[in-house]
Image: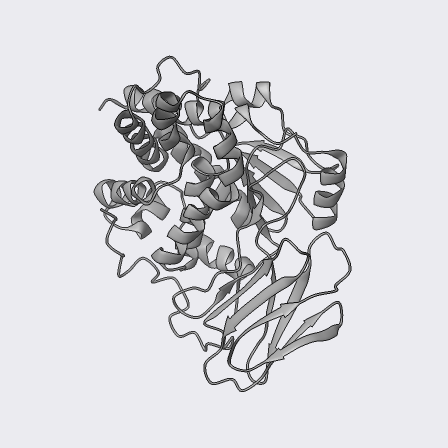
Amino acid sequence: MPNKTRVNAAAYALAAAALLTGVCAPAAAAAPDAGAHHHAHHHASHRIPFTAAQVTAEDDGSYRITWDAPGVRRVVVRADGRTVAVGGSSATVNVRGLPAADRQWFDLVPDRGEGLHLADRLVKLQGTVNFRDAGGYRTEDGHWVRMGVVYRSDALNNLTDADLAKLQRLGIAVDYDLRTASERTSGPDRLPAGARHVVADVLGGSGAVSTMPTSPQAAEQMMVGAEKYMVSGDTAKTAYSSVFAGLVEDADGSLYHCTAGKDRTGWASATLLTALGVPRETVMADYLASNDYRAAANAATLAALPPAQAAIYKPLLDVRAEYLDSGFDEVAQKYGTFTAYEKQALGLDSRELHRLKAQLLEG
């Protein structure tokens, strides 16, 4: 398919998804590259003994904290300077009665090795549904991606003043806007004072929708084509290169987003996590989580449409494993390995990847 046709198809697919998202906006995979992480810390000391750990904020204001730390006998959970729970090498604990906070952090302190500093991945704001931390994942070689450094989100034009104050307290310093010119015009970002806005237009066009799919299968193919364009399209490579150049320079307080926070943003996160050494199944789980975070908004959008039309448009609102798989397929087809994609498409050499990992990995 000629490149111009491909960018138009990608623009139609993602702009259609963005258009639908705005209706109810809140006020075969590439084989793992054996050498893809030759620049990673192959001889990791596994100083962090946790093989799994997660914080989940419950609807009743409590927090569920789970972990696995083989070989550890005791883990102390601390919050706000005090011990709130204690468990063994593998446990699930519930913590209640903590005071309200912008974001509740927990320190998991094992009786040997280094601890973890974790929070619920979702940052709750009034004007977004898919604003979340890009970190909190374990890499294949035993490191962990730091939380509280890089964030991903859906559109920021509906942020309230309270949201902006919260983001300023969280230290958001730079916003990489992956949207088209028409999206930026119709819904300009609201940012905390002092935050820098960087245009990184993945599609490089207006994103105007001149045709819509006429069947669910056609909608699915549009999304697959859009995913492939995000890997090898010229404007996509330029946009993602600018994002990664910024992260390499200074990742702290960085945010990247599109309209729904699932497709263009989803590939940005998939690329970042893969470059850091996070295993593919974890990358996929992070990508698919948009279906959970966007569930209510997507359901409201589809409920407002006639059933036949809703069936056609549902693939545009979803994230699906086959979409992300098609992106990794494109990497394998066009570049051979993920390492080659990092270098040729994103301009990331081993030195820059080392700088990125130094900022974002711990342990």
**Quadrant showing the N terminus:** top left
Q: Where is residue 24 shown, x and y percent of the image?
A: 56, 27
| Residue in the picture at 70% in, 49% down | 170
Compared to 95, does 225 lie above or below? above
Q: Total number of numbered labels?
A: 0
Q: Nearer the viewer, residue 32 or 41?
A: 32
Whole-percent x and y of residue 188?
62, 24
In the displayed structure, does residue 320 sit left or right of residue 183?
Answer: left
- Can I make out residue 308 in this image? yes
Residue 259 visible (yes or no): no
- Residue 153, percent from left and from top: 55, 40
Q: Residue furthest top?
A: 210
Q: Which residue is drawn at 35% across and 41% down?
A: 320
Q: In this view, does 236 lie above or below 266?
A: above
Determine the residue positioned at 49% across, 38% down.
242
User: x, y (%) of residue 21?
Assistant: 50, 28
Q: Nearer the viewer, residue 257 or 352?
A: 257
Q: Which residue is found at the position 44% from the left and 30% from the top?
A: 202
Q: Picture quarter containing residue 60? A: bottom right
Left-right relation of 105 to 221: right
Q: Which of 323 and 353 is in front in this view?
A: 323
The image quarter in which residue 16 lies: top left
Q: In this view, does 231 lie above or below 12?
A: below
Residue 201 lies, with reference to residue 343, above or below; the image says above
Q: Which of 78 and 326 is in front in this view?
A: 78
Q: In this view, does 331 lie to the left or right of 27?
A: left
